[in-house]
């Protein structure tokens, strides 16, 4: 396979038509048979791949170029997720506005050339696939929860459903109830993931205001959590960053291995 075919495969798994702003091919390559795949794969991993004879390096998180500078754009995906959950469009837009602006300011500070320039010097094919794989993971998590949740289900039932996924069982981090209690009614559940980063205080608060009983994030900032706890509304389940990313990455690795491509995981929880 070549790097473009790998990206296309990821889009197909996510059922996306276009490459999101936070994913890109930095250096294209053909006849890829051996891949080093890391959640965070930068200059050190590129050097390791060169030394060990890999054909390409794939990172999950953006490592440079437009994927880093335009990363904030995918945060708007929270809007379509919120609308799908029954939240009015204008309310959803308002909920993402502040954090979207913060992310744009933050991405403007990033060193977008470093890892990419290292890859160029090494002549190592290099790419990152972020939102497509997070969308794969979001769907897997949501489907698992929906297959187990009933009208009288509790927050603990959500955790038990997610723990059926091997990535969560094998992870060092454990799924946490950051807001609410295990015995609380789960109510309507939303897996808020696949939009660059978590929606923070505003997105979770808006979900609760419009009748969502439990929000599932893969991580949350302490300041946002403190504000949510002060309001004492709803349940927030946090599944863990690396384990959750791995849920979406592993299906792509499986498809690559089915095509006789060797993949070495760096920092990815295996199935």
Image (cartoon, rainbow, N blue to C red):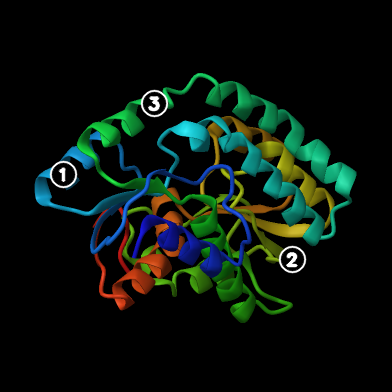
**Compared to 101, does 159 lie above or below?**
below
Answer with mark 1 or mark 2, whichever residue precedes in sequence. Answer: 1
Q: Identify the residue position indicated by label 3 in the image.
A: 113
CB atoms of marks 1 and 3 within 8 Å: no
Measuring 63% from the left and 43% from the top, which residue is drawn there?
Answer: 74
Label 1: few (<14), some (14–19) or many (≥20) C-alpha neighbours in 10 Å? some
Residue 92 percent coordinates (x, y):
81, 45
Disc 3 versus disc 2: nearer the observer? 3
Q: Can the viewer see residue 156 in this picture?
A: no
Q: Can the viewer see residue 207 in this picture?
A: yes
Label 2: few (<14), some (14–19) or many (≥20) C-alpha neighbours in 10 Å? some
Which quadrant is the C terminus positioned in? bottom left
Q: Identify the residue position indicated by label 2 in the image.
A: 188
**Compared to 45, does 254 lie above or below?**
below
Q: Give the residue at the far top of this rendering.
A: 109
Q: Is residue 271 left or right of residue 21?
A: left
Answer with mark 3 or mark 2, whichever residue precedes in sequence. Answer: 3
Q: Nearer the viewer, residue 170 or 38?
A: 38
Measuring 42% from the left and 69% from the top, which residue is drawn there?
Answer: 251
Disc 3/disc 2 C-alpha distance (Å): 43 Å
Q: Is residue 188 left or right of residue 117?
A: right
Q: Identify the residue position indicated by label 1 in the image.
A: 50
Measuring 67% from the left and 31% from the top, which residue is drawn there?
Answer: 99
């Amino acid at each position: 396979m070549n790097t473009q075919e790998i990206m296309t495969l990821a889009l197909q798994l996510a059922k996306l038509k276009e490459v999101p702003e936070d994913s890109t091919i930095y250096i294209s390559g053909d006849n890829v048979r051996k891949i080093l795949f890391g959640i965070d794969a930068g200059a050190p991993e590129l050097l390791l791949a060169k030394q060990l004879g890999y054909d390409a390096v794939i990172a999950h998180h953006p490592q440079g170029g437009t994927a880093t500078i335009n990363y904030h754009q995918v945060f708007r995906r929270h809007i379509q997720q919120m609308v799908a959950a029954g939240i009015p469009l204008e309310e959803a837009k308002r909920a993402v506005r502040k954090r979207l602006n913060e992310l744009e300011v933050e991405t403007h500070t990033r060193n977008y050339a470093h890892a990419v320039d290292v890859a160029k010097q090494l002549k190592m094919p290099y790419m990152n696939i972020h939102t497509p794989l997070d969308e794969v993971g979001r769907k897997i998590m949501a489907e698992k929860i929906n297959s187990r949740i009933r009208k009288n289900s509790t927050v603990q039932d959500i955790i038990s459903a997610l723990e059926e996924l091997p990535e969560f069982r094998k992870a060092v981090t454990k799924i946490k109830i950051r807001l609410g209690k295990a015995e609380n009614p789960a109510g309507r559940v939303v897996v808020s993931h696949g939009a660059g980063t978590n929606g923070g205080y505003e997105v979770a608060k808006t979900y609760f205001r419009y009748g969502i009983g439990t929000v599932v994030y893969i991580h949350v900032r302490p300041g946002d959590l403190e504000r949510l706890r002060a309001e004492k509304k709803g349940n927030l389940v946090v599944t863990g960053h690396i384990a959750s990313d791995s849920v979406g990455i592993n299906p792509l690795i499986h498809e690559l291995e089915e095509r006789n491509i060797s993949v070495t995981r760096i920092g990815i929880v295996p199935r």
